Amino acid sequence: MALLEVRNLVKEYDGKTVLAGVDLDLEEGQVKVVMGPSGCGKSTLLRCLNRLIDPTSGQVIFRGEDVTRPDTDVRALRQRIGFVFQHFALYRHLTALENVTLGLRKLRHMPAREANEKAMHELRRMNMHEHADKYPAQLSGGQKQRVAIARALAMDPAVLFFDEPTSALDPLMSREIVAVINQLYLDNVTMLCVTHDLFLAKYISDRVLFLDEGRVRAEGGADQMFSDHDDPRIRAFFGHGPQDR
Amino acid sequence: MSGWLSFLHDALDYWPQILAGLGNTVLLAVIITVTGLIGGVFVFYLTLSPNRLYRRVTEGYISFFIGTPLIVLLFLMYYGLPQWGLRLSPLTVSVIGFTMNVAAYNARYLMTAYNGLDHGELEAARAQGFSGLQVFRFVTLPQVLRMSIPGLTNQTILNLKDSSIVFLIQYTEFFAQMQDLAARNFQYFKTYLVAGIVYLLLVSIIVIAARQLERRFVMPGTRA
């Protein structure tokens, strides 16, 4: 069954069309990567799906329920979607452990001890348990992103959204995060990942979507998309100019 | 030297009144610091409201109280309201007047700190499913308060010092008593010098306390 079905999603800001009718399906256990040039609407797409941004029109069906309806419990929806950001967005006044437990304690009303145990479990999974008492400013970029992933996983989300998770990292840290996400992929975590990072896309994805000017221009397997695609715009994006032919 | 001896003698005679005045000064400063902080947080919260009308009204409130001398407000309430049949005690008038004024200043300090926040963290909290009020309580406020400690400390010092103006509405605080003393012994210089030193000592206590607070609550990595 599809976890997420997006139908003809449109988002306009002040008469400017950012998303011009996007269709997308994500099955349970599937990983999809959304790629495309800057400004093509990738980040807006993710934010429309969890209603951080309200779409202008179209439907988002999450486990059979249309979540674009006005009576949707937006906060309940968001709690089922783990969100990992480009710039980590850890709460800087809290330790790594507290970053993970905040949602468990305040949203799930879990007792402190139980929340700590659950958080330590997730931090161990990310190999960050030894840094549990450090503050975000005392962690490297890669470590911060691992804490952010632990924070998202602790809420037992139905799906993880990644918004350019490796873009703010140097190549070494970036590979560290790719390995972590790949492990999640092997663990069958459902994921939707927006990225520019070809390496990440190749590693983790079943399917790649190419978003351009607010529309899905093509969708296919990673190999098919990155090698010699018929569409010249896609070829150009992935670095196969006319001279390669 | 004998001048100081006779001054000390007078001061000792007058000691109960001075002490009572000092007590009133500290009482007022403590009350308005607490109510001003609570009021400031409340006004700050309203400035973040998604409702445009609330934001406008709050901005107007802040501009009004920062733009009007406090003494006008105090006189208005203490000498003006009785003409409408409403008589308030000097302490009540002082607390209301200062709270409204200090809340406006504190809200400004908090807004300045808010502009320095990483708004990605606030988005992350909303994405996690926190309500607007929860984001404010668990992310915005803890960070903004920490960053505002220097500004809020300054305001606390101002509260203590400015409390000396309320002798003008018959609140017998420390400075009023010192004026009384000076009028009795004619030792103006010595009396007001001592008054100044006492204020300085009280301010020093606030500064030391604020340092401790800052050390305890500083966020690692937020200052170079």
Image (tube, rainbow, N blue to C red):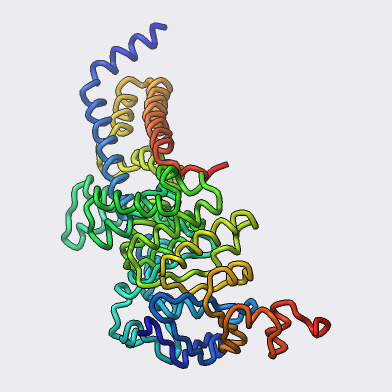
Q: Quadrant of residue B54?
A: bottom left
Spot occupied by residue A164 in the image (x, y as percentages of width and height): 56, 68
- Image point (32%, 26%), residue name: B183
Spot occupied by residue A121 in the image (x, y as percentages of width and height): 34, 52
Spot occupied by residue A116 in the image (x, y as percentages of width and height): 30, 49
In the image, is B212 to the left or to the right of B181?
Answer: right
Task: Please state which of residues A53 and A103 is positioned toward the viewer in this rendering.
Answer: A103
In this rendering, is residue B199 above or below A102?
A: above
Task: Please state which of residues A189 and B182 is positioned toward the viewer in this rendering.
Answer: A189
* Quadrant placement of the C terminus of chain B: top right
Residue farthest along the right direction in this orientation: A243
Residue farthest along the top direction in this orientation: B2
* Quadrant placement of the N terminus of chain B: top left
Whether residue B132 appears in this view of the structure is no
Spot occupied by residue B6 in the image (x, y as percentages of width and height): 33, 11
In this rendering, is residue B53 above or below A231?
A: above
How many marks do you count on the picture? 0
Q: Quadrant of residue B40?
A: bottom left
Whether residue B36 appears in this view of the structure is yes
- Image point (53%, 85%), residue name: A13
Task: Please state which of residues B137 and B59 is positioned toward the viewer in this rendering.
Answer: B137
- Image point (45%, 45%), residue name: A135
Task: Please state which of residues A102 and B63 is positioned toward the viewer in this rendering.
Answer: A102
